[in-house]
Structures are given as structure tokens and as C-alpha cells.
Amino acid sequence: MSRQAKKYSTLKNTFELHAGPLSVLLLAVLLLSSCATPDAAKIRREQTTGFLSSLDNRTRQEIPKDGSLTLQDSIRIAVANNLELQSARIQKNIATLERKTAFARFLPKVDAGLSQQWARYQPEAVIGPMSTTVSDRRIRQTMLGMQQPIFVPYTWFLYSMFRKGEDIQNLVVLRTRQLISLEVTGLFFRCLALEETGAFLQTALEQARALENEVRQARAVDMARAGDVAEAEALVLSRQFSVNENRRRLRQSRSELLEAMGLNPLSPVRLTHSEQPPYRETPLDDLVLEALLNRPELKGQDYSYAIAKDRVKIALTEFLPKIFGTINFSNTTDSFIRYQTQWFGGLDGVMSLFNGFADINAYKAAKQRAGDVYVRREMACLMVMLQTQQAFLNLQSAHEQCTVSQKLLTAREEQFRETAALRQEGLVQLSERLSALTRRDEARMQHAVAGYSRQVARAVLLDVTGRGVAPKVPVEE
């Protein structure tokens, strides 16, 4: 017989002697359940299957059949499905429950108890040479008690702390929505910029292939060297690599966008650019003031400082008495008790007189923590001011870049028209026309990318000033 079987047999005999067959059955169930080892591979396989199925269903529901998405659609889907935002909502719900739990400290506490006692011998007391019975052998006692806080100051400030904590979590949810909106905006325009870059790189590849063909023809009549042919081939390979690398980057950016939206990163998608509402130019001073008034982080810092001051007040309440009112009801079946049913009422008060200066030092520490939170709030204000200025300057740079790229695009389009006209008359070679086309497409790409960069810069400025609010999506809490 194995060691485990012997141990089980010993425990079984013991319980049969003291507890009966029911305890033996419960023990057997516990031993069998403890011996079962979960199949990790099976659990992982089932979880993976369920996750992929849920992800595919959500992706099919959110993405239209043609796979096209606008920026507004992408932000709406991300706000509804982003996992970080779901986690923030859960933390908000937890903060709400903690606040409700803290409120329970103001309500009465009711306890009930039931006890049953069996004595082997009749309880007796020896009085001189005699003994007398003092209690029944079997006694059942019931108890019902209620305690109501009357003067417990720390509970007021504790509830205030949890209520402010709930407000902080609401701000965290708001800020998370804003950051998700900003992230989706940046990824959306990055994908569009890579698409524009891909069109330019494809044109550049065609121009390199035409140049290689012309060099090979010149080499055939000894008008070009072998090194020229090798250099043209290397140019074609380089352009081909750039095209392939851009496609990989575009695929990766689309996957990151879908992941931020809470969808399958491997799903095909087509992005459609729509014109954004015009941006209202605002002076830098007004933007800084708006950021200081509206940024959720600064509001959260205000709540944190208020919580720190509540902690100071809680430390002060340790020097005050705590008073509770109590009401108790008891009943016993002991026939030797004259009044088997009793009601008790009273007041309980506790006050700490001396605990090794712990209360004094805790009060000093709470004041220091409040000072630290105040300093951190000031640092956050300075950081917000700096972020607002940087976003404002970046938007100015992006706007000027759009102006320059528009002027360059106009010049390159005119040059391409002139070169194309000369090509029709046979005055220039095909490679020169393709080179002009490549320069025109490059200018067009630069202008499009500059426009996308300006859109992102606007979104960043709206975000740092606290106006970048993503749409609210109803969710089941």
C-alpha cells in the first residue's frame, strides 16, 4: 500500500470514530479534488479558441463589408472596444464600490449568533460537603446585537477620501478616452502617409527601371560602361526594397491601428480620409490658461491634494474619543437561568491616551505627504504649460511646412507638364519624363504628408489643452 493510501486509511478510521460516515465522505471528496491536476494545454487551447472567435466576431460587426473606415469611425470603435479603456472603466466601478463600502461605516452593524453546547457530565458546583447542579447539560444560546457609531470622526473623512477617489477614476476614464482618440488619430494619418509614400516609391521604381533599360541599350552600342549598368541595377534593387519596406511598414501600422481599436490586427482594412473641421486659431496665452483649467490630470491632482488633506484630518481624529451605541438581545434554554431572555443597552467609548507618540508622528507624516502632493501638482502645472507651448509651436511649423510643400508641388507640376510636352515632340528621353514625374509625385507625397502632419499637430494641441474629448459610447458597466 502506498504512503498516500496509508495516510487516507488512517484519516478515514479517525473520522469514523469521531465524526461518522458523513465526515468520511467529505474527506474523500476533498482528497480526490486535491489530487486532480488541471490540464494547462487544454485550458490554453480553449481560451485561445474562445478569444479568437470573439475577436473575429467583433471585427466583422465593427468593420463594414467593403473594409473602409474613416477617422471618426476608427475613434468610435476604439472607444467602444479598447482594452485599456475597459480596464479603466473597471477601476472606476471598483472605486464606486469602495465609496459605497466606506458609507457603510455610518450605518448600524448587526450581528447574530447561535451556539449549542453539550456537556458530558451534569455541570455541578461543590459547596462545602455538598454539590448542586448549576446548569443543564444541553444549552442553546441565541444572540442579536447592534452597534451604531455615534461619534467616530475618521469615518467622515474616510468617506470623503473614497468619494474623491471615485472622482479621480472618472477623470482617468476621460483621460484614457482622450489618449486613445489621439493615438488612433496618429496611427490613422500615419497609414495614410505611408500610402502616399508607397505611390511615390512605385513611380520612382518605374523611373529606375526605365533608366536601367536606357543604360543597357547604351551599353549594347558601347556608349555606356559596365559600371553604369551595375549602378542602374543597384538603383532598381534599392527602389524595389524601398517599395517592399514601405508595404511592410504600412501593414504594421494598420495592425497597430486595429489593435488600438480592439479588433483583429490581421484583418484587411481600407482607410478613407475625410476633411476635418477648420481649426480656430487661438493665442498661446489663452491656450495655456485653457489647458490649466481643463486638463483632467490637473483636476486629478486637485483631488489628490484634497485626499492628502483628508489624511491629515484623519490623523488628527486619532486624538479624539470614539463613541458607539450598543443594543444586544440574548436568549438561552438553560433552565437554571431566571431570566432566559435579556436586553442590554449601553455606550462604548474608546480614547487613545498614549501609544508611544505614534499618533503625533503619523500626523506629522500626513502633513509632509500633503506638502509633497502640493509640490507634485505645481510640477504638473508647469509640465502642462510646457506641453501646450510645444504643441502650439509644432502646429505653426506644420502649417508653414504645408505652405512650402504646396508651393513646391505647384512648381513640380508645371515642370512635369513642360517635360511631357517636350517628350511628345521627341526632344527628351523617356527617363527624363519619368524623372520629372517622380519629382512631381515626390512633391505630391510631401504635400500630403505635411497635411497629415498638420492634422496630427492639431489633434495634439487639442489634447494638451483638454479639448480632445473622444465620443462617449454607451457600455454595460
Image (spheres, helix red, strand yellow):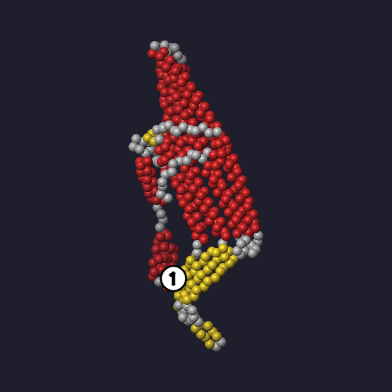
Image position, residue 81 (x, y; %): 42, 44
How many numbered circles does the render carry? 1
Indicate the quadrant where residue 445 lies.
top left
Indicate the quadrant where residue 277 lies.
top left
Image position, residue 192 (x, y; %): 43, 31
- The residue shown at (44%, 23%) is 441
Judged left or right of residue 397, residue 76 is left
- Three-letter amino acid code at disc 1? Thr
In this view, the residue in front, 255 or 331, is 331
Q: Is residue 212 visible?
A: no
| Crowd rating for badge 1 (residues with CA inside 10 Å; few <14, some 14–19, many 20+) | few
- The residue shown at (53%, 71%) is 345
Q: Is residue 90 above or below residue 266?
A: below
Q: Is residue 152 visible?
A: yes
Q: Is residue 22 above or below residue 130?
A: above
In this view, the residue in front, 473 or 26, is 473
List the single residue furthest toward the left: 65
Image position, residue 32 (x, y; %): 40, 61
- The residue shown at (55%, 64%) is 150
Indicate the quadrant where residue 57 lies.
top left
Tell me the quarter of the image containing the N terminus: bottom left
Q: Is residue 409 above or below residue 428?
A: below
Image position, residue 173 (x, y; %): 48, 46
Judged left or right of residue 4, residue 370 is right
- The residue shown at (47%, 68%) is 112
Judged left or right of residue 90, residue 289 is right
Disc 1: which residue: 14
Q: Secondary structure at mark 1?
A: helix
